[in-house]
Image: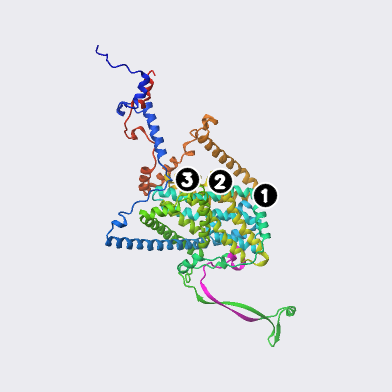
Amino acid sequence: MPFTSNNPQVPLSDIKRNINDMPIKVPLDDLPIDSPYMLSMDLALHEEAHEEIDNWALPDLEDSGPSWKELNNKQKVKHVVTGVVKGCLLIGFLYLFICSLDVLSSAFQLVGSKLTGDIFSDNDVLANPIAGLVIGVLVTVLVQSSSTSSSIIVSMVSSGILNVRASIPIIMGVNVGTSVTSTLVSLAQSGDRNEFRRAFGGSAVHGTFNWLTVIILLPIELGTGYLFYVSEAIIKSFNIHAGGEAPDILKVITRPFTDLIVLLDSSVIAGKAAGNPEFTNHSLIKRWCATTQTNVTEYIPATNLTNCSAVTCFTNASGTFIENTVTIKENVKRCFHIFASADLPDIAVGFILLTASLLVLCLCLILIVKLLNSVLKGQIAHVIKKIINADFPFPFSWLTGYLAILVGAVMTFVVQSSSVFTAAIIPLMGVGVISMNRAYPLFLGSNIGTTTTAVLAALASPADSLSEAVQVAFIHLFFNLSGIVLWYICPFLRLPINVAKKFGDITAKYRWFAVLYLFLSFLILPLAIFGLSMAGGIVLAAVGGPFLLVLIAVLIINVLQKKCPKVLPPFLRNWDFLPIMLHSLAPWDRLIFKMCGCCCTKCSNDHEEEKPKDLLPVDIPSRETHCYDNPDFVHSQNL
C-alpha cells in the first residue's frame, strides 16, 4: 500500500522526546505576525535581552596595543614619553579643575553674600526647624562649601547669636547641600549615555543618602533631642581646650593661583553672617592687603561741661574742648589680583567669575575624562580597576567597605573639602574605574571627613562659648555616623544605591531629567518647603501632609506591583488607568524635544537611536525555529 511502511510506528509519547534530538525547522515567513507563537517568541527575546545586559557592570577597559616586550627601542621611548606627557596633562587639568571649584565657591559667595547675611541674621526664621533645614541647604548651595557653612554656624553659636538646638536642623541642611557640587560635575559627562548613567548615579547616591538621613533623623531629633543630649554628654565627659586651625593642605597648593584671580575677606563673610552692622556695606573682595592703624587725637568743642567729668577736657582762649582719641585706618598696599582695582559691585564680579569658572570646570572635566579614557588601558588600567574594587578574602570581605569609609574620611580631611573629593570620584565612576558599591562608602567617609573642619573651627572659639561650639561640631559628626548606621551597616538597607541606580537609568534614557533633579532637589523643593513652613505649621501640615501620604502610598504600591501583585486589586497592578503623562516620561520627553526645536535636532536623533525601543515583531532578528516552539503545533498533537 502506498501509505504503509515496514518501520514500526513510533508512539506519540516518544515523539515529544525525539523532537529535541531532531528539530523541525519552521520558517518565520509562513506564520502571521500576530500569532501566539510570534508574540511568545517576542516576549522571550525581550526578557532574554534584559537578563543578559547589566547597565551597571563596569566596562572592559580597552587594550593599549602590543605588550611592552613586543615593542622595539624606538617604540618604547615613544610609549614612555607619551605616558609622561599624558600624566603631566592629567595633573595639570586636575589642578585647574580644583582651582575652578575654588573660584566657583568664591563666585557663589559674591553673588549670594547679601542673601546669605540676611538669612543668617533673621533669628525668627532660624528658630523654625523646617526653615532652618532649608536655609542650611540653600546657603551651602550658594557658597558651594559645606566647610564654610558649618564654620559660619559654629561661629554664630560661639558668639551667642544662635543656640545649639536651633543649629541642628541647619547642620542637617548643610549636609544635604554639599552634594550639589558632584551633581554639577556629573553633567559634564552627559555626552555618553553609559558614562552619564554611572556618573549621575554616583552623584545621586550621595544626595539620596543625605536626604534619606534627614527624613529619618529630623523628626526623631525634634521628638527626642537625641543628637543634642548625646553630644552634650560627650562634651561634659571631656576636658576640651582651645586648639588651632584646620590644616589647609590643598589651599596651600591652589591659593598661589586662585589668589591671582580674586581674594575674599573672610572676616567680612563672618561679620555679615553674624549680623554685625559694621560689615553691612563692606565688599567681600579684599582690595587692600596691607593697612596701618594710626591713633589720632581730636579736640571737640564741649557743648555740655558735665561731660568733662568723664573725659579729658581742657580750656584755652578759644573755649573748652573735649580730647578724643580715634583710630584711623590707612591703606598701604593694594592686593595683587584681577579685581583689586576694578570698581565693580560684588554681584557683577560674582557673575563674571561664575560664568568663567563653570566654563573652565566643564572644559577641564571633559579633557580629564578624555585623558582617563586614553590612559586607563592595558594591564595598568586592569590592575588599578582591580585594586580599587577588590574585596578582602572571605570571611573578612565585609571589612572592605569600612576601609573605604576610612579612606574617604582621611582624604577629605587632607584636602579639607568634601566637594573636591566627591567631584574627583565622579569622573572615575563615569569612565568605569570605580563601581557604585565602592564609591558609596567613599562618599560616606567624605561626610565624616568634612566634619573635622567644624571641629577645628570650634576649638578656636572663645573659652566661655567653647563647649557650645564644639557641641555643634560633634552634632554634625554624630548625624553622619547615624546615617551610616541606618543606610550602610545592614546590606539590605543600602537603599541609596538602589534609588541612585534607578535615577541613573532614567537619566541615561532622558538626559534632561538630571537638570530637573538638580533644580527640584536643591532649589524648587527647598524653597517650597521654606515658604510653607513660614506660613505656619497648620499650612505646612495641610499642604505637605496629603502630598507626603500620596507619595508613601505610591511607593508602597510600586513595591507591591513588583513583589506581590496578587494582593492588589486588578486596576492597581499597573498604572495604565492613569493618563500616560502621569506614569511615563516619554510624553514629556517628546514635548521637551519639540520645544527645543532645530537646536536639539542632533541630540534628538542621537536620543532616538540610543534610547531602548520596545521590541516589535518586525524588529526581531530571524532565528532558527523548531516545531516544539510553536504552540499551534503542540496543541494539535493528542499527547
**221 vs 450: above or below:** above
**Mark 3 element type:** helix
The span shown in magenta is 270-298
**Mark 1 element type:** helix
Report the front residue among 340 and 11: 11
Q: Is residue 144 visible?
A: no
Disc 2 marks which amino acid? Cys
Q: Is residue 276 magenta?
A: yes
**129 vs 34: above or below:** below
Disc 1 marks which amino acid? Thr
Dot 1 corresponds to which residue? 224
| Residue ID at (62%, 50%) | 218
* Quadrant, the C terminus: top left
Q: Determine which of the numbered discs, if any, sits on residue 490 in the image.
A: 2
Q: CA distance from mark 2 to mark 3?
A: 19 Å
**516 vs 407: above or below:** above
Q: CA distance from mark 3 to mark 1?
A: 34 Å
Q: CA distance from mark 2 to mark 1?
A: 24 Å
At label 1, counting other C-alpha atoms closer than 10 Å, the crowd grade (few under 14, some 14-19, many 20 or more) is: few
Pinpoint residue 151: horizontal percent, then vertical percent: 58, 62
Query: Quarter of the image holding residue 330?
Result: bottom right
Pinpoint residue 401: horizontal percent, then vertical percent: 51, 51
Foreground: disc 2 or disc 3: 2
Q: Earlier in the sequence, mark 2 or mark 1?
A: 1
Report the front residue among 28 and 119: 28
Dot 3 corresponds to which residue? 501
Foreground: disc 2 or disc 1: 2
